[in-house]
Image (cartoon, helix red, strand yellow):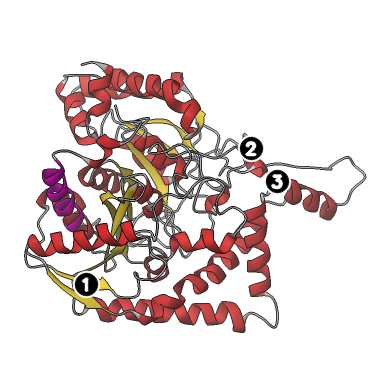
Amino acid sequence: MSATDLLRLSAAELGEKVRAGETTSVEAAGAYLDRIAEVEGDIHAYLHLDRETALAQARAVDERIAAGEDPGPLAGVPVAHKDVFTTEDMPTTAASKILADWRPPYDATVTARLRRAGTVILGKTNMDEFAMGSSTENSAFGATRNPWNPDRIPGGSSGGSSAAVAAFEAPLATGTDTGGSIRQPAAVCGLVGAKPTYGGSSRYGLIAFASSLDTPGPIARNVLDAALLHEAFSGHDPRDSTSVDAPVPPVVEAARRADVAGLRVGVVRELGGEGYQPGVQQRFQESVELLESLGAKVVEVSCPSFDAALAAYYLIAPSECSSNLARFDAMRYGLRVGDDGGRSAEEVMSLTRAEGFGPEVKRRIILGTYALSSGYYDAYYGSAQQVRTLVKRDFDAAFENVDVLVSPTTPTTAFPIGERTGDPMSMYLADLCTIPSNLAGNAALSVPCGLAPEDGLPVGLQIMAPALADDRTYRVGAAVEAALAERRGGPLLSENAYAV
């Protein structure tokens, strides 16, 4: 097969061909590594690449298959890995100067499971520093660009992963979703991105931002590929105290089913209207009508506490961040500044954190420390946790009457690079639709639903389901994907400027 043919295959198709001997993992990895060399200068999706290590992984997979072993449906398939998961054979920086060139002594559970599944980790992808941001402009190592329009952001914090998949620099990628950091970049890059149920995928070896919110998940070019990756690295992990001891929901089976007949779909009244881009609203409404035409019963649902979810999140997440990032103190590992023998440990710590953390990370540490301080804890952090409880109750009440909820994934399409960097509040509004699911811990997925007519950029449809009902999001997403592909005569991503 030619390199272009390999790049055009879905992850599921590529895995089948590798296992059938129609191509090899080495050929697939080589095709993607060559593609990265061709376009990475424009996109900057990766922070670390090691061609020889990737090809060595691929050769090992080919040897396993030649020996008669079947490592699984993703054996031999390349993956772009977000640089927030520890990897013992590559640096893990979380896109921060404070961890520049740090090499962990162990693999994250997600990393280990990717290896066990036979995937080939091509490299580590760019991100907002410590996963704090919605545009991947907060990386200490430079911004990533959206392959649909390199003057636009690729979303964040998993923007390097989304850009890599959209630019055909990888067929699959990992991400983490704290307030929408998988679904939002997937939406603005015309991809599928899933936030599994909180605890459904392990956080062991994931550099923590907000421990009660962080959730590893997949990014892919179609729903089935996302489901296969989701299944490959999810499941109970005794090393993660927040891991759910329950079977992985049947997401692959649901993605193959792609049927919504008889499903009850709730449209969230609070996630739409003023402030939403007209083209986003138009494509969302068309998606709702499409679901009805496919046999779903659609009703409007009100979740009034969602109006306060953004404010609650931006107290809870920074509070947890201020606690988690206290470990970066220049004493144990990572960057150390000013240690000339004449300064105290406190001075070295202050100098290191001042130089090592970027502006957005500092902003959130200060916000969180203030919210947790004596005299303000109850008024701010305590109140935010009460709102979190109300958000969960609204979800519970809604799911008594519907099987899934739907909304736009983001209020707008990808905005220009630099447009919101001086206005943090407008940046935070990019997560308006995605944050409620993180606060509640339930499952959610974004699937492309067309291009906004005013700018020709992708729009995402968000599908939300109860905790441990992740399969419902894949079932609905696959049905929408199939129906839209039939109408369009092909996948949305084929219109991307960097499509192969």
Q: Position of residue 163 (x, y in %)?
A: 41, 38
Q: Position of residue 431 (x, y in %)?
A: 44, 61
As rendered, which of 137 and 411 lies closer to the eye?
411
Does the stretch in magenta take in 141?
no
Image quarter in which the C terminus is found: top left
Image quarter in which the N terminus is found: top left
Is residue 33 visible in the rendered image? The answer is: yes
Q: Secondary structure at mark 2?
A: loop
Residue under numbered circle 1: 266
Q: Position of residue 348 (x, y in %)?
A: 82, 49
Mark whose residue sits in front, 3 or 1: 1
Give neighbour class at mark 3: few <14, some 14-19, many 20+ (Cα, 10 Å): many
As rendered, which of 111 and 12 lies closer to the eye?
12
Q: Secondary structure at mark 3?
A: helix
Left or right of residue 314: residue 449? left
Give neighbour class at mark 1: few <14, some 14-19, many 20+ (Cα, 10 Å): many
Left or right of residue 108: residue 458? left
Residue under numbered circle 3: 356
Q: Amino acid at mark 2?
A: Ala
Q: What separation in Å lies between label 3 and label 2 (alpha carbons)?
A: 9 Å
Measured along the vertical axis of the image, is residue 362 above or below residue 485?
below
Left or right of residue 344: residue 270? left
Q: Which residues are magenta?
A: 476-488
As rendered, which of 485 and 120 lies closer to the eye?
485
In the displayed image of the protein, which residue is found farthest to the right?
342
Residue under numbered circle 2: 100
Q: Secondary structure at mark 1?
A: strand
| Res. 216 mark | none
Q: What separation in Å lies between label 1 and label 2 (alpha carbons)?
A: 45 Å
